[in-house]
Amino acid sequence: MKKYMFLLLAMLVLSMSAGVYAAQPPSAPNYNAFQGYGLTGISVSDLIGTPATMNMGVLGYKLSMSASPTLYDGVNVYAITEIFGFWAIGHNFTGLDTTTDESWDWGTKYTGADGAVAGWDNPSKSNVIVPGGAAKTFTFTSLASNTGKTADGTFGFHVSVDLAGKGCPVGFGSGNTAFVFNDPSMQPKAVPEASTLVGFGSSLAMAGPGLVGWLKRRRS
């Protein structure tokens, strides 16, 4: 009898623990989890379509991607395949909460003097933003921050990229997903257009005989 009572009690404790665990809100990434990359094709605007930054005092945001969004890690350019998290990240946040969430999980995290994050995540990837797909709308009930990882405060994203045989982006660890923000100083250098290179090659070809003659005269 005591054995059965013990088993019953153990099952009850486990059941209560599971219920408490399930009721916990999902954990948000911390401020230092976000790393800067050169991002293109990710659009954050206010609800009427004006490009938005955190210092505008806007509470409602629309997030979307172009047909060909990219991430540059200082070495390679990767295609972004999905966004499944959106945050405001910065210092000195006040009164962060939400009214709409696009069925993504809401979470906040404060990291002492480093900073704070507040926003939404969809770790199951059941409702992601895809390149060229429909925008999603997110609304804070209040949002205040002086600066983030850039001068005007920062938006962060949880993204996946197509590795395309290039290996993982710098800072991604061993996977193809990471918490990122746009660093305007990280953009790939422009590659000369093919027509420019053709013209350059033609100029060298035309100058070739003269250069050969000049070299012969120098040697003599």
Image (cartoon, grey):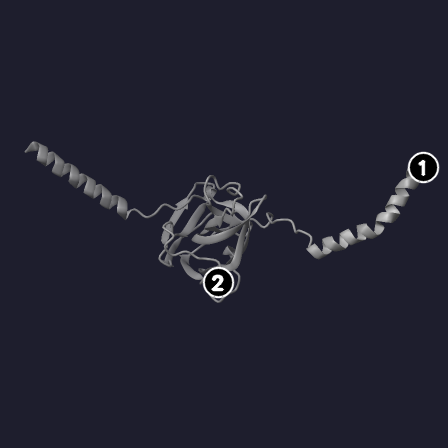
Residue located at (52% from left, 64% from top):
50
Quadrant (top left/top right/bottom left/bottom right) for the N terminus: top left
Tell me the crowding category of disc 2: few under 14, some 14 to 19, or many 20 or more residues within 10 angstroms, Cα based.
Answer: some
Instruction: Where is residue 88? Give x, y as percent.
Output: 46, 52
Mark 1 or 2: the one toward you? 1
Q: Earlier in the sequence, mark 1 or mark 2?
A: 2
Instruction: Where is residue 190? Give x, y as percent.
Output: 66, 51
What's the residue type where badge 2 is placed? Asp
For residue 46, side relative to residue 21 (left or right): right
Residue beneath label 2, please? 46
Quadrant (top left/top right/bottom left/bottom right) for the C terminus: top right
Q: Secondary structure at mark 1?
A: loop
Q: Nearer the viewer, residue 156 or 198?
A: 198
Instruction: Where is residue 214? Give x, y as percent.
Output: 90, 44
For residue 123, side relative to residue 210 (left or right): left
The answer, for residue 91, to whether it is visible in the render is: no
The answer, for residue 175, to whether it is visible in the render is: yes
Residue located at (54% from left, 43% from top):
166
What's the residue type where badge 1 is placed? Ser
For residue 220, which numbered disc appears in the image?
A: 1
Residue located at (9% from left, 32% from top):
3
Q: Nearer the viewer, residue 184 or 90?
A: 184
Q: Secondary structure at mark 2?
A: strand
